[in-house]
Amino acid sequence: MLERKELSAVELTESVLARVEAVEPSIGAYVTVTADIARVQAAAADRLRAKGLGGPLTGIPICQKDVLATRGVRTTCGSRMLEDFVPPYDATVVRKLQEAGAVMIGKGNMDEFAMGSSTENSAFHPTRNPWDPARVPGGSSGGSAAAVAAGEALGATGSDTGGSIRQPAALCGIVGLKPTYGRVSRFGLVAFASSLDQIGPFGRSVHDCALLLQAMAGYDANDSTSVDAPVDDYAGALSGDVRGLRLGIPEEYFTADLDPAVRACIEEAIADLERAGATIVRGISLPSTPHALAVYYIIAPSEASANLARYDGVKFGYSYHDGGGMWEDMERTRQHGFGDEVKRRIMLGTYALSAGYYDAYYLKAQKVRTLIRQEFDRAFERCDLIVAPTTPTVAFRLGEKSDDPLQMYLSDIYTIPVNIAGLPGMSIPCGFAQGLPVGMQLIGRPFEETTLLRAGDAYQRLTVWHQRRPELAAMEAGS
Ligand code: GLN
């Protein structure tokens, strides 16, 4: 509509801001709404488009996860520690999306420091699932996913350390893509576990995600882990053709924990892809999969304990001042600034790295990590993509897993191995169980995002799941 001049970017932004106003009281997707910035950016987008300039994202309203630094706009990371932190610079991804003409509606709510699977660990408020406000949207990028599902943004950014893009995408019925480790610059991403963290897009369609990734991906001198490899033409690769593509089905991802109704949706989606001409390769073997969760909960907290050492109340963020001296001030800063889950991770990580335990835990986890990666390499000799569920169940109720960290951790069993191996993974809506969305996960070889996107787009051309809207959003839209 923007291209056909049936709608201006300002009108589009105003309609999204009106939706935000209408549904935020029941969803809570945003920590901060940046309406003034959005209006300025939308007007600039219209001026560009009037001159025949700009690209596909010019004037498109998006939500930025509050883990990404935004110059002049507070970046909380869902934590009291950064409640009033206003970065003096933009994350590379924020800058790139801005340069592509995207309009920032606000900063998406998240689990504190991206630690969680439900967005209940936000220090500010939980986010609710637009399909059923009694349920969680997933996490940690729950605000971003809920915003897109509820029509409070047309696309969003997220970060994924163990599933934080794919899991909320699945539970909210949208598409979420975690690119290959190194594909997107993390400069300006508040670090959680640096060997696992990656930034990626959310959209209603695979095509939308392709456009967003195009703008986000690429080498960045400010992030030495970003890879200097050419960025493919993602949208251009969406041919709709999956003929001859070999899809591997790993037994280890269809375990007893998998809800039978979720399994049925995945099986049907696999059959749809087979009818479209893909070749199904059963019996792909990833035997170390059952160890992935344990490996992750050694490596991620270890790295987090180091990354979070910087929050000492001295350089930036929350600072306690009335203690008996420097050490007490630092202790109190961390005692008050961090929530329970973050403290749990810091303690786990500090323990795993401590003298005498390092070899037994951290080093051993690194060895199993290598095995997991090697098994994926071998699996990809027999197939081009791996198909699996994204989550074992549909969205659970608020409070259902809050008192049981292990149950919460288990909602990421199918997404975590992908981060451990550094591979690209994407969740796509593939049906409904108990009236709630189900996500199918596609996993690819390193830097083969194009294959993921092509298969996902082909699937969306055959199915209508991604076109369904939650009733909440539909009701508000009609009003
Ligand atoms: N839920 C996982 C965790 O709590 C993954 C989070 C993430 O990907 N950021 O660590």
Image (cartoon, rainbow, N blue to C red):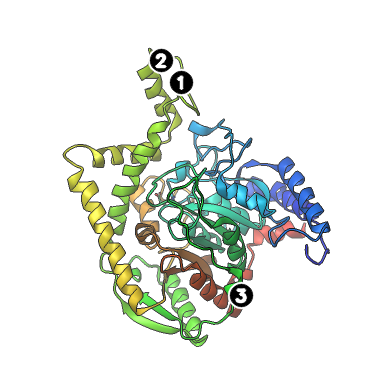
Tag 3 secondary structure: loop
Q: Quadrant of residue 349?
A: top left
The span from disc 3 to disc 2 (Cα, nearest Å) is 59 Å
Residue hosting label 1: 320
Label 3 Cα crowd, 10 Å radius (few <14 / some 14-19 / many 20+): few
Q: Please say if 297 is above or below 380.
A: above
Please report whichever mark, 3 or 2, sits nearer to the chain's N-terminal start. Answer: 2
| Res. 464 mark | 3
Q: Are marks 1 and 2 in contact (CB under 8 Å)?
A: yes
Look at 54% across and 67% down and name the residue there.
Answer: 232
Residue hosting label 2: 323
Across and down, in percent, residue 260 comes to 40, 72
What amino acid is found at the position of numbered circle 2 in the picture? Gly
What amino acid is found at the position of numbered circle 1 in the picture? Tyr
Q: For the C terminus, which image quadrant?
A: bottom right
Look at 45% across and 25% down and name the residue there.
Answer: 313
180 or 278: nearer the viewer: 180
Which mark lies nearer to you, 3 or 1?
1
Label 1 Cα crowd, 10 Å radius (few <14 / some 14-19 / many 20+): some
Which mark lies nearer to you, 3 or 2?
2
337 or 93: nearer the viewer: 93
The span from disc 1 to disc 2 (Cα, nearest Å) is 7 Å
187 or 463: nearer the viewer: 187
Q: Is mark 2 within 8 Å of ligand 1?
A: no
